[in-house]
Image (cartoon, rainbow, N blue to C red):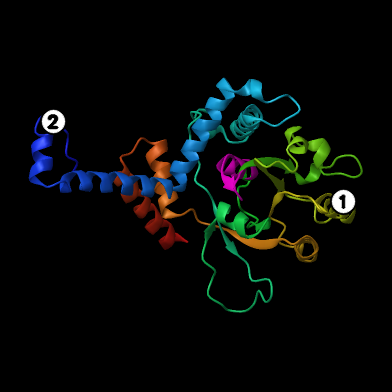
Amino acid sequence: MGICADESKGELEEESEGRARRLAMRNASELLKIQIENQRFLNVCLRHRMLRADSEEAQLFPQHKVGPSAVAKLEIGIRQTLSERSPEFKAKPDSFYLPIPRLRKVNLADPTLETEPSKPTDLIECLKQDKRILVRLQRTYPSAALGWSLAYSIIRQQLGGKTALPYVVSGDALNPPHSGFKQLLHPSFEKCANSPEFARVIIIEEPLFHLKNRMRFLDEQLGDLDAYVIVITKAEDAVTATDDLTKNNGFSSDNLAPVSLSETAYFLEKAFDMPAMEADAVAMRLDDTFRKLF
């Protein structure tokens, strides 16, 4: 419980011999420390900083450079595509929050080996460990908007001290010889190469693993590309082709895992204006239900 300053403040400090002041200072510093260690708080600060830069400092960034306005435009494009692919997203406000997905690493050395499943890790942490990730989905997974959902959840996040700029490309659009990343992605993709401020993230939806010429072209496109890459696929039967992609291009292999309890609670709190404690309770009940069903 906080102590409000009033006319008896001096008397309180004198009676407590300064202990009340030291307690207040310690509480304030501990709260600041907790907030600085909270990734959500940092993300909100970063978002506000970038939005303010859009309105106040856009003139500082010439058109040939990638500035905050380019980030905002990229985010608008992601939202528009999500609205088209996911009707329930259309009516959501700009501040709408999507939970950050988690991944669970696949044991490629011996998939038949019975080992303890790896711990689910959120996507941002996975990218900090592996710059290239192959996300394997079950064939029945409703993935019409997954790539764009991933993009929306990681834009403006921090990767290696840089702001993440996600770009989504359909696997069937990658077609030799003239439909590569440079031609298909937003112009800012090329402009922010080697940028000290931005980290490019390419999300490739469903590469055509059954077409060898397309996969050779994808290998060429990846080459020495300096960017984070996420490949999403439901191609369970293309074992050889997916293994070749991971081995030839340094991909880790991961399965999609359930969203964490804390992310679910935060989503409920923001999406349905729930008090934090109520959101936590509902999230726990949902988690318990899903565990029993699946």
Q: Is mark 2 on a helix, strand or loop?
A: loop
Q: Does the magenta stretch include residue 204?
A: no
At a point 11% along the width and 47% down the height, the residue shown is 16
Mark 2 or mark 1, which has the lower sequence index? 2
Q: Give the camera-side residue of 139 and 252.
A: 252
Q: Which residue reaches farthest right? A: 177
- Closer to the camera in the image, 198 or 24: 24
State the image coordinates of residue 264 (x, y, percent, origin top left): 43, 48
Residue 14, percent across and down?
A: 10, 42
Give how far across and how far down residue 87 sits, in percent.
56, 32
Q: In this view, does 153 lie to the left or right of 23?
A: right
Confirm whether residue 294 shows in the render: yes
Quadrant of the image occupied by residue 170: top right
Mark 1: few, some, or many residues within 10 Å (few <14, many ≥20)? Answer: some
Indicate the amino acid at tag 2: Asp
Q: Residue at x 34, y 53 (%)?
A: 285
Amino acid type, label 1: Phe
Quadrant of the snapshot with the N terminus? top left
Relative height, residue 289 to residue 92 (above, below): below
Q: Mark 1 points at which residue?
A: 217
Q: Kindly tell me whether residue 97 is visible in this rendering.
A: no
Q: What stretch is highlighted in magenta?
A: 147-162
**Of labels 2 and 1, the one closer to you:** 2
Task: Please provide percent x and percent y for residue 286.
Answer: 39, 52
What kind of element bears circle 1? helix
Q: What residue is rendered at 20% in x and 43% in y?
A: 21
- Above or below, 91 relative to 190: above
Compute the Cα span from label 2 to label 1.
72 Å
| Quadrant assignment, res 132 | bottom right
Q: Do the residues labelled 2 and 1 touch (CB within 8 Å)?
A: no
Residue located beneath label 2 in the image: 6
